Amino acid sequence: MATSCMVGVTPEKAIELVKKGRTGDIVALKYWLNKPDAKVDPKNLGVLIRIPLLTISLARTPSIRVVDGILVCKAFLSEDILPDEVKIEENIVGQVEGLKIYKVSVRIPFDDLVGIFFPLKDID
């Protein structure tokens, strides 16, 4: 049985790897969601949600960046995990298996990060 060894990286390294087309996972204590183009305000990050992890890649989380110690990215998430506050009709980008997919902004303060992991084979 083959296994993939995952290694932790810094937010900056994660951004670099995503821009190179690699795929990784973020594990955090809290994730905050907001409208895709909402300003990043550390005092009001948006709506709190709890999910086990967020997969990051060019296709899933475009425009990943760091703003004032907060990892910020646009993401495409299904309606079943989103709170009503971020389900905005104009941000629907498609449908998968009957569920609407919304474009949102995910915000993760560094203090809430447990780790960002990529397969060892993808680390340069």
Image (spheres, rainbow, N blue to C red):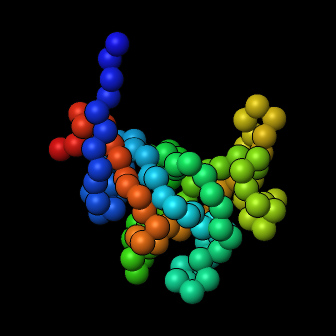
Q: Is residue 49 above or below residue 5?
A: below
The part of the image, by quadrant, that contains residue 95 is: top right
Q: Is residue 59 above or below residue 10?
A: above
Q: Residue at x 42, y 63 (%)?
A: 113
Total number of numbered discs in the rendering: 0
Q: Is residue 32 above or below residue 1?
A: below
Name the spot of residue 85 as percent of width and height, x first.
78, 68
Q: Residue at x 33, y 23 (%)?
A: 3
**Residue 106 visible in the current orientation:** no
Q: Residue at x 44, y 52 (%)?
A: 26
- Outermost residue toward the bottom in this view: 43
Name the spot of residue 4 as percent of width and height, x first.
32, 28
- Outermost residue toward the top in this view: 1
Left or right of 80? Residue 47 is left
Q: Quadrant of the N terminus?
A: top left
Left or right of 65? Residue 80 is right
Name the spot of residue 15 as percent of width and height, x first.
34, 57
Name the spot of residue 124 as percent of width and height, x first.
18, 44
Q: Residue at x 60, y 67 (%)?
A: 32
Q: Is residue 3 above or below residue 39?
A: above
**Residue 79 visible in the current orientation:** yes
